[in-house]
Image (cartoon, helix red, strand yellow):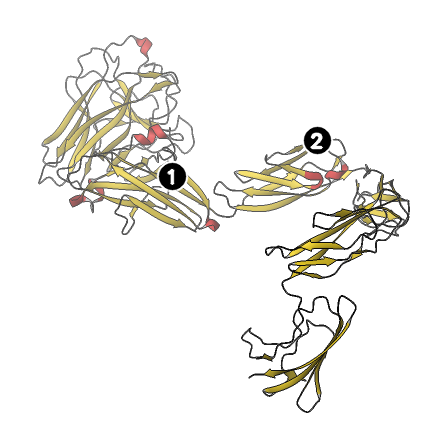
Amino acid sequence: MLIKCIKYYCLISISLFFNVSAAAQLGGLGGPLLNVSFGQAATGDASVPGQALPLGYTDFSYTTDICPPTGSYTVVSGLNHNCSDDPWIQLLADNSPFPDSNGYMMLINDIARTSPKLIFMDSIRETCTEVNYQFSVAAINVGNPSSGCVRFSSLTLQVEDYQGRVIASNNTGDIQFAIYSMGYHFSKYVVDFMVPAGVGGIVVKIIDNPKSTSTNCGNAFALDDIQVRVTGPKISIGFDSTPIGDWVKSTCFQDNKIFSMNGNIDPGFPNPAVQWQKSNDNGVTWADIPGATGYTYAQNFAVSDTFLFRLRGSDASLISYANCGVSSNLLKVQVDGIPSNFSVGNNSPLCSGQDLIFNVTGGASYAWWGPNGFTETAPYAHIYHSTLADSGMHYVKIISPGGCSVIDSTEVVMLGVDVKLSPDTSICNGTIVQLQATGGTAYEWSPVEGLSNPSIPNPKAIPGNTTTYTVSVKNTDGCSNAGSVTIRLRNIDPVRAKFTSPGFICRNYDSASFTDHSLGKIERWNWDFNNGQSSSLPNPQIQYYSISNNTSTYSIRLSVIDSAGCADTATNLLRVADNCYIAVPSAFSPNGDGLNDYLYPLNAYKARELVFRVFNRDGRLIFETRDWTKKWDGTCNGDPQLSGNFIWILQYTDEANKKIALRGSTILIR
């Protein structure tokens, strides 16, 4: 509800962005040029009347009596009383589509008359010609239906120029009761009009018509929400890719999100034009968005605030005049900041087994997590059968409607010690097993041999023999308890699979030998040579490989099992070389271009006991290596050598165990 106080009473406009049926009433209507809903009671006490209308606005006399005598009026927030002289209906709220909080209405107690009497009058100075307007009022007869009245007061809604000439007029007929399942409701009465050319301002009047009845029966009624608004084609707006009726978007300022809006206008204006408007004060004031004159609009939202949007439309000749067009339904963008006004707590300390209850306020949704696998999304999360493992810090993410979040925590203190341990188990020697204890805040394991850390609840253990580990558990209250876990070894000697293999074989056909070096009391071997062959021998036969052009490696696997059934697996990689012919280049150019930058014996994959030496023209040794992959870069002690011939000597033992000695020269090119 948006309130703007003008003159001696408050004008109230209702933002209808959160209800489909209510918002639909705004279609084809502009913002109110006149909007009188008589304000609202600050105290909520229906016995406290509102302020009188300004002098000259009515011919009726104002009274502070909530049961106004005949010929007078008052301003009240409800009719939940019985007046002794005139039993009236019980009316608990005013007419607002979503009733005002203690909203006021004008209550008139008239008498039968032969001449009309002015109930309400006001003027509007700024109007537009050739524009359709609607003058409306909400009214209800308040006499009790059981009184037997068959005729009620009727009103005339009249629009005049400043010279008193009538522009439009309409008679409501007898004001009736509007009775629905939820009680009595107002009815809306309207008169449509157009301001003639040359008329700059108008006067609107609500007149109580003559009624020839000799009693006061049926002459009491209430008015509310007196409005003058532009009428015209219906304008509808919505968010892109959003179902119809979803008029509210929430986001977090940190998301820097862009929302796109679109609108359309029904036929009716000869040359329609539109203007997007924004309100940062919840609809009290509206401002045109510069340049936003199309049917789509998008904005980035990176500042926490609440924004309202609407699309104003009129004929293009009048689009610059705020009171000459119609407005759409409203869209709302709520940009949240980081939640700040929140609270988090729990009902501990508790004894183990009691209900542990968490509470959090200040968000739209929540996500809890904590010890012992605790997760929950309710603001009042429960652990119905708590244990000592629930002790510790529990965290909650407090999430706003737009997704902004903050994390807070609350500490849970559980009393008593309930030690829970991981079960006894059997392992193979060398296997790592993790012990586990819960129930306290301090732990001490013994013996300490083979433990990663004896002072934590879950140390890792690598026992050298069958061992029983005992843990002492304490909590912050000084309570303690103990438990034990036995780890049995299935074998004394650890089993380890291990074998040697050549590093390379050569395309297109080659052989390889494999030698077992596994440790432990091995009883079974299982070789997989990746050539379609397998073996269960500890030292298998030589294996042969017919190597295709698209094969680059072979994975060789050995699995072993000892007498206790403990197993281990080792894998070696056998690489394929395209060429195993050993040669030394006749020239190289160490210029850093990635081509022939180094001198070394090529393809020496299978050479053993290799020695490669390089000498300069003076016979001085300037490079030597026993690793053929270590290459000469054309320098000596970091100094680049001059271009020219260099002598090399290569010695190695080949795969047939034959010693080879080669000598040659190469040219260094710079």
Rate crowding at label 1 as few (under 14), some (14 to 19) or many (20 or more) other CA atoms within 10 Å: few
Q: Which residue is drawn at 34% across and 41% down?
A: 283
Which image quarter: residue 502? bottom right
Q: Which mark is residue 241?
A: 1
Rate crowding at label 2 as few (under 14), some (14 to 19) or many (20 or more) other CA atoms within 10 Å: some
Q: In which quarter of the image is the C terminus?
A: bottom right
SS for callout 1: loop
- Left or right position of 338 against 513: left
Do we see residue 104 in this rendering? no
Q: Which mark is residue 343?
A: none
Front one among 194 and 636: 636
Front one among 614 and 343: 614
Q: Quadrant of the N terminus?
A: top left
Q: Which residue is drawn at 31% across and 30% down?
A: 24
Q: Position of residue 350 (x, y in %)?
A: 74, 35
Q: Which mark is residue 355?
A: 2
